[in-house]
Amino acid sequence: MAERARPQRVFLAHYTLSNGTRGVLHLVAPASFDAVDRALAIFGEQLRRLSVRPHTH
């Protein structure tokens, strides 16, 4: 039996990079851990701070 896909949610990721740049990303992921993983994949070692919360409409 095939594994059932988890529903996707939108998360807000507030970040700070090593050069001082700050911003907010909207990330689509099934869980907050996956959103953190995606932010790490985007920014790599430049990422210094990250806060991920569910987006409320």
Image (tube, rainbow, N blue to C red):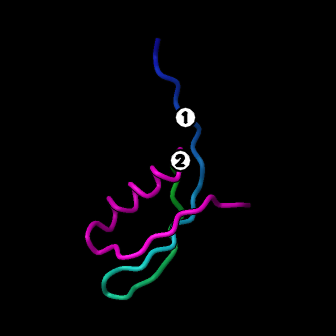
Q: x, y (%) of residue 50?
A: 45, 70
- Image quadrant where residue 46 sits: bottom left
Name the outermost residue toward the left: 45
The numbered mark at residue 31 is: 2
The numbered mark at residue 36 is: none
Q: x, y (%) of residue 33?
A: 46, 51
* Mark positioned earlier in the residue sequence (2 or 1): 1
Left or right of 57? Residue 44 is left
- When the figure is inspected, residue 42 is found, relative to residue 8, above or below; the finding is below
Q: Quadrant of the C terminus?
A: bottom right
* Residue at left offset 28%, top offset 66%: 44
Q: CA distance from mark 2 to mark 1?
A: 9 Å
Q: x, y (%) of residue 35?
A: 47, 55
* Type of amino acid under label 1: Arg
Q: Residues within 10 Å of mark 1 (few under 14, many from 20)?
A: few
Q: Residues within 10 Å of mark 2 (few under 14, many from 20)?
A: some
* Residue at left offset 35%, top offset 76%: 48
- When the figure is inspected, residue 51 is found, relative to residue 7, above or below; the finding is below
* Residue at left offset 40%, top offset 85%: 21
| Residues drawn in magenta | 30-57
- Front residue of 8/33: it is 33
For residue 9: magenta? Answer: no
The residue pinned by badge 1 equals 6
Name the outermost residue toward the right: 57
- Image quadrant where residue 7 sits: top right
* Type of amino acid under label 2: Ala
